[in-house]
Amino acid sequence: MCIVGCIGNSLVIGAVLTHKRLRTLGNVFVVNLAVTDTFITLFVATFGMVGILSDGYFYRDKPVLCNVIGAVCMVA
């Protein structure tokens, strides 16, 4: 999921940046969504999978990391 999300979002960002016809105001919003989604798939989804695979024990002694990931998820 993370790999496919990063590849797809990279293709969207690359297409808008390389083709002049795609550089419209609406596509600026699409690029913003792609950047945010890339950040979420790289950061939040990765730590989410770690939490699921470790049955939550990974976060028991790291409450700050857990709060940071939750804050990043909410902001992004």
Image (cartoon, grey):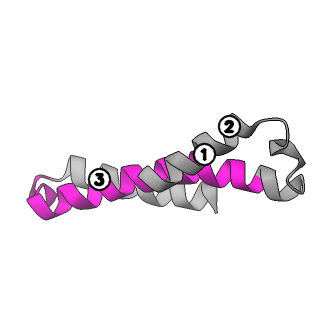
Residue 30 locus on image (x, y percent):
27, 61
Q: Nearer the viewer, residue 59 or 35?
A: 59
Kindly identify the residue that appears in the image at 59 percent across and 40 percent down: 68
Q: How busy is the neighbourhood of tag 1: few (under 14 within 10 Å), some, or many (20 plus)?
A: some
Can residue 26 be found in the magenta stretch? yes
Q: Which residue is mark 2?
A: 65
Q: How busy is the neighbourhood of tag 3: few (under 14 within 10 Å), some, or many (20 plus)?
A: few
Q: Secondary structure at mark 2?
A: helix
- Asked whether residue 11 is in view, the answer is yes
Looking at numbered disc 2 in the image, what kind of residue is underneath it? Leu
Distance (Cα) linking label 2 and label 1: 6 Å
Distance (Cα) linking label 1 and label 3: 20 Å
Looking at numbered disc 3 in the image, what kind of residue is underneath it? Asn
Any mark on residue 46, and which? none
Q: Which residue is mark 1?
A: 69
Disc 2 vs disc 1: Cβ atoms closer than 8 Å? yes
Kindly identify the residue that appears in the image at 73 percent across and 39 percent down: 63
**Count of all numbered marks drawn on residues in the image:** 3
